[in-house]
Image (cartoon, helix red, strand yellow):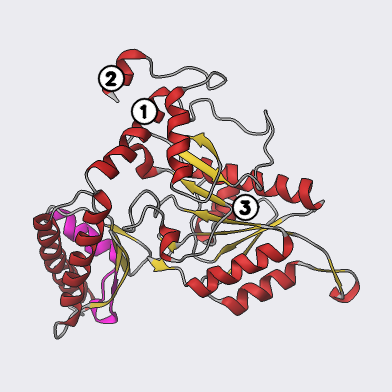
Amino acid sequence: VTEQMRRVHHTSNLYYIPKQGDLAQMLTDRSPTDKVFFCNSGAEANEAAIKLARKHARTKHEITEPVIISAQSSFHGRTLATIAATGQFKYQEPFLPMPAGFVHTPYNDVAALRETVERIEKSGPFGLGKQKRLAAILLEPLQGEGGIKPGDPAFFAEARRLCDERGALLMYDEVQTGIGRTGTFWGHERIGVRPDVITCAKALGGGVPIGAMLCTEAANVFAPGDHASTYGGNFLASAAGVAVLRELDRANVLANVRARGEQLRDLLEAISAKPGSHLAQVRGWGLILGAQLGESARCTAAQVCAQAAQGGLLLVPAGPNVVRFVPPLIVTEAEVAQAASIFEQALADASAAAAKAATPA
């Protein structure tokens, strides 16, 4: 990155940027996709996917009112279209009305997904006719903001089947799970169901802003001018992305993610197994784990995170009662052990403080 800054860090991407081509090749080599659009963030990557799905529905299937199904409790970004796709009303309420064309279904519920597809396709008097409307199904392989909930392979397989029947796109939001976070390069490798579109960001740039929307050739309906990003995939961002992917391979980072993820899970489950523990459940993949608080905790995940910060450990809530662990992919064995110890004390202190505050004077 420093070397790239010394040479040139930005030009218009109307011109060929060699490392952008290198990065696109590296991403498609690691996925079932053929094309890459670069942008600056996860929300922008999901915006690109939404636009691609709508144009694909209109041009390939003559759908005039395309609908994208996403999951309840999902999170896809903070732009107007991506919060419409997000299945959490708290993010939408301040900005109502939402753009049309998004429907939400319960995550990991196969029957509900089938019913949702059937419902949006009903048309005509008394709902007796059918109208092709499904443009895409947009899912996180593991819900992050929704409470660290891993996807069920059966649910994703059904989503694939429903999309194939209707020529719709199956799109995976891998902004939180992609680029090694789960112990595999992509989170959906844990599920084993092929997508048509993948979005990623965050880890791809190692701290330099970058996002990417990947798609198969069959899904690629964008023409020049359909979509663009001034800084997307510029010299600096592409150099960072190439460096990140090379380092993942050179340092065998995914092996560390798997080993440290297993270590952290074991330590958290040991805390949960102790008599009187305030920890109810541990779930997730690799180094994206959620520790769900039990009812006995009487405190919120945010309160535990605040207490942990005082002890030198940075955590973040994933909903009101789930503490999210997303350490660096290069975290060490000693650091994981230290983190678990600080968390255990923070959980005890936050719970005791909540109980004391609830006790009448």
User: In which quadrant of the rendered image does the N terminus lie?
Assistant: top left
Q: Which mark is residue 96?
A: 3
Callout 2 touching callout 1 (CB < 8 Å): yes
Q: Amino acid at mark 3?
A: Leu
Position in image of residue 229 (x %, y %):
55, 29
Q: Which residue is mark 1?
A: 239
Which residue sits furthest top? 7
Mark toward the viewer: 3 or 2? 2
Residue range corresponding to the magenta coloring: 291-310
Among the two numbered marks 3 and 2 on one chain, the one whose residue lies closer to the N terminus:
2
Q: Does the rendering let one see residue 230?
A: yes
Mark toward the viewer: 3 or 1? 1
Position in image of residue 169 (x %, y %):
64, 55
Q: Which residue is mark 2?
A: 3
Which residue sits furthest right? 125
Magenta stretch secondary structure, dominant: helix
Question: On screen, 131 above or below 236?
Answer: below
Residue 214 or residue 77, whichever sits in front: 214
Q: Badge 2, how many Cα within 10 Å: few under 14, some, many 20+?
A: few
Q: Badge 1, how many Cα within 10 Å: few under 14, some, many 20+?
A: many
Q: Amino acid at mark 2?
A: Glu
